Amino acid sequence: MSQTPPPGLQEIVAHKRAEVEAGKARTPLAELEAMVAQADPPRNFFRAVTRHPDAIHFSIIAEIKRRSPSAGLIRPEYDGDSFKPESIADAYWRHGAAAISCLTDERFFGGHLSYIERVRAAVPLPVLRKDFIIDPWQLWESRAAGADAVLLIAECLNQSELVDMMILAQQLQLTVLVEAHEMESLLRVVPHAGFPHAGYFLLGINNRDLATMRVDLSHTLRLVGAVGDLVGDRAIIVSESGIRTRDDLLRLRAEGIRIALVGEHLMRQPEPGKALAEMLRSQVAM
């Protein structure tokens, strides 16, 4: 019997639209606005990942991820109530993570919005909400839930939607990690790098093809090489997915890229924090 193929981006976004409409009915925007007005200020995600104390330092955004559409449940012990995102976040923090990425999509990734608050209460690191953000309501929801940053996927948003989201995120003091996989999407995003405020914008290149779920680390290097000087400051580039070893970090650093988001590789290990420490051994000294 052939396996059911993993859901592609279109299927995920279609489900997310229905999910957002249901969320709006449960929690109107006015209620989220009131929650945000009472919330603590966000932690500075941008500064946390772009601050490098020396020439060999590398920033890892360590991800908390229970399952994926392509791989299913990443480890058996992540099933049910035994999954403790705060414990994983604490291990990441103690072993050198610069920031935390937290999957909150429930259907396809087994996440939950409440994980953000649980993680933020456990560690002093800033937290990225990683989800499929397709509506401004979700930015208010993210801020109310305690997120310090949000992921915006270029392939999920048209140009005007992307710009509007970036403006609202900055008003909410949220760092945006604007991610692209396709060259066409990257070229569409690059002119907006640093908009509307340079201290709130990171440019992500996803090495995972969201249509096929295949991963190739060389994708970051090819795209950065192809767009050349259009990217400008490579200090804001984040390589995402497919990063597994110290040598992978060295390859990225050789191209001026010093931030990576690492998730599934770490979450597959019996001790994700120690796996992170090994990856960062000697801060990837040559």
Image (cartoon, helix red, strand yellow):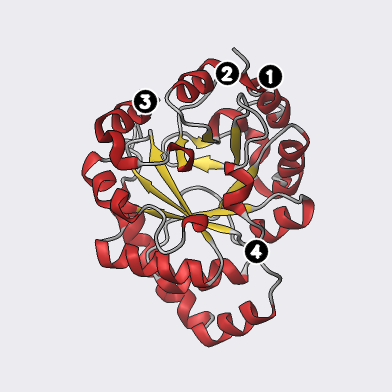
Q: In the displayed image of the protein, which residue is found farthest to the top?
A: 286
Q: Which quarter of the picture shows residue 132?
A: bottom left
Front residue of this view, candidates 254 and 41: 254
Residue 129 lies, in percent from the top left, at 55, 55
Q: Are marks 4 and 2 in contact (CB under 8 Å)?
A: no
Mark 1 Cα within 10 Å, few/some/many (few <14, many 20+)? few
Residue type, label 4? Pro
Mark 3 sits on what residue?
216
Three-letter amino acid code at the position of disc 1? Arg
Residue reaching furthest to the left = 184
Give whichever of discs 4 and 3 has the lower sequence position: 4
Q: From the viewer's perspective, is 93 left or right of 239?
A: right
The number of discs equals 4
As measured in the structure, the alpha-carbon distance from the residue carrying label 2 to the one carrying label 3 is 16 Å
Q: Position of residue 2 (x, y in %)?
A: 30, 30
Q: Secondary structure at mark 4?
A: loop
For the residues marked 4 and 3, what is the alpha-carbon distance in whole angstroms?
Answer: 33 Å
Instruction: Determine which residue is flagged by label 4.
Output: 42
The spot of residue 225 in percent (x, y) is 30, 28
Camera-side residue of 5 and 111:
111
Q: Which of label 3 and label 1 is nearer to you?
A: 1
